[in-house]
Amino acid sequence: MAIRFISLLICVCFITACGGSGSSVSSSRSSLANSIATTSSSSVTASSSSATAIRQQINPREAKFFQEAGLWLGYTKVDARNRFAQDDPQKPFLETRLTETSVNTYLFTPASNEIAEGLCVFPLDPEQTKDGFRNMLFDTPVANELYCVTDDHLFREVDGSYTVEYHCGSELVATTRLVKVSSVAAFNDHGLILGGAQVPQSGCFNWNLSHFEFWSLDAQGRDIQLESDAHVFNGIQLRTGINKHSVLFYFRNIKSAWKSGVYDLAPHDFNDPMLIDSAAVEVLPANAGLDVDPQWHISVSHGELRLDRIEPLRMSGSFLLHESANKSISGSFSFDVSEYFTE
């Protein structure tokens, strides 16, 4: 899932994604995709003449992520609510409502001097889950930031995919579906073009659409009125390559969920109060310890992001980034994972 925050009356953070690239996934994988459907039930059955197959709840260490190399896609859906009593007889309750979807890429690969771990790239090491499965999946962990400490349950589905369920007490507040799309330890999709040329192995992409509201309720829990929207970080992350010269393009929008349109870009600066009025961008190594490639790494002074389409499972657009020294980077992208998931 990307890093985000929610301000105003309460601070809530959730998922982003590793988080932000890849194109429409190849049609050769469509047979697998046809067997994938979003589910949050405790069991899935498949009839046969001899037995009934049932999804299994497993320990994260048992997952195939750490047993064989491959490229996985994740799709997360959040619908979380929290109610507070108020000292107001006309509006006795205030309810916060967080809805979100995010798409994330996960490449699990053996350790190598040619491969740089970081955004989207993970070693074949089950120790990554020692602090919780969600800590591996997302830049911002799902825990107290949501409004309660979530219990995570990992299920292996009968088709070989996985589902992570996040529970707050008895309430299911989010699910992540994980589908393996390739057994090759490389990004196989080419949805990012820079300077008119396709970028080899540009398959790492993450984006999220988040919305957070405050509602007043009556004593019976019925809606009275929408009080306000909160600011949420919505991110788009595109990583080029998996080596030590990998580049990350990171776009942030804290005003609202992304929509189709043109965004003026400013350099990323958390201390800049004007950030709330524009989208922000960073171009940086995909991990803080990686080398800087002067061909692509620039200090952005201004730019433009054009989103032709952005939906829970599809995104396309382009960008133009400028540096003060008359240097610029242009790019376009198109990603579609709808053959793997249902909205």
Image: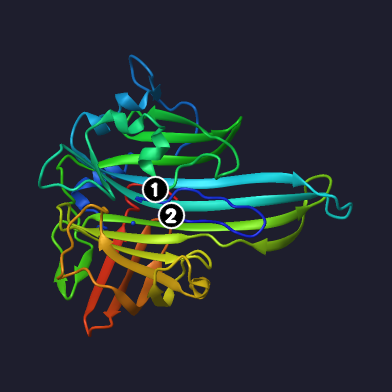
User: Viewed as shown, does residue 79 lie left or right of 114?
Assistant: right
Q: Position of residue 174 (x, y in %)?
A: 51, 41
Comparing 337 with 96, the one in front is 96
Q: Residue at x 48, y 41 (%)?
A: 142
Quarter residue 33 falls in? top left
Confirm whether residue 37 shows in the render: no
Q: Position of residue 253 (x, y in %)?
A: 46, 66
Quarter residue 223 falls in? bottom right
User: Viewed as shown, does residue 39 lie left or right of 316?
Assistant: right
- The residue that disc 2 covers is 3
Which label was assigned to residue 294? none
User: Viewed as shown, does residue 255 lie left or right of 159?
Assistant: right
**Secondary structure at numbered mark 1:** loop
* Rendered position, 282 above or below 322: above
* Rendered position, 312 above or below 330: above
Q: Position of residue 124 (x, y in %)?
A: 22, 33
Comparing 132 with 45, the one in front is 132
Q: Amino acid at mark 2?
A: Ile
CB atoms of marks 2 and 1 within 8 Å? yes
Q: Residue at x 27, y 54 (%)?
A: 288
Task: State how many labels appear.
Answer: 2
Comparing 158 with 208, the one in front is 208
Q: Position of residue 277 (x, y in %)?
A: 52, 75
User: Viewed as shown, does residue 247 lie left or right of 150?
Assistant: left
For marks 2 and 1 on the same chain, the one whose residue lies earlier in the sequence: 2
Q: Residue at x 43, y 35 (%)?
A: 164
- The residue that disc 1 covers is 139
Give the class, few, some or many, for how many residues have Cα within 10 Å of label 1's Cα (few <14, many ≥20).
Answer: some
Give the Cα distance between marks 2 and 1: 6 Å
| Structure colour scheme | rainbow
Confirm whether residue 220 shows in the render: yes
Q: Residue placed farthest to the bottom in the image?
A: 326
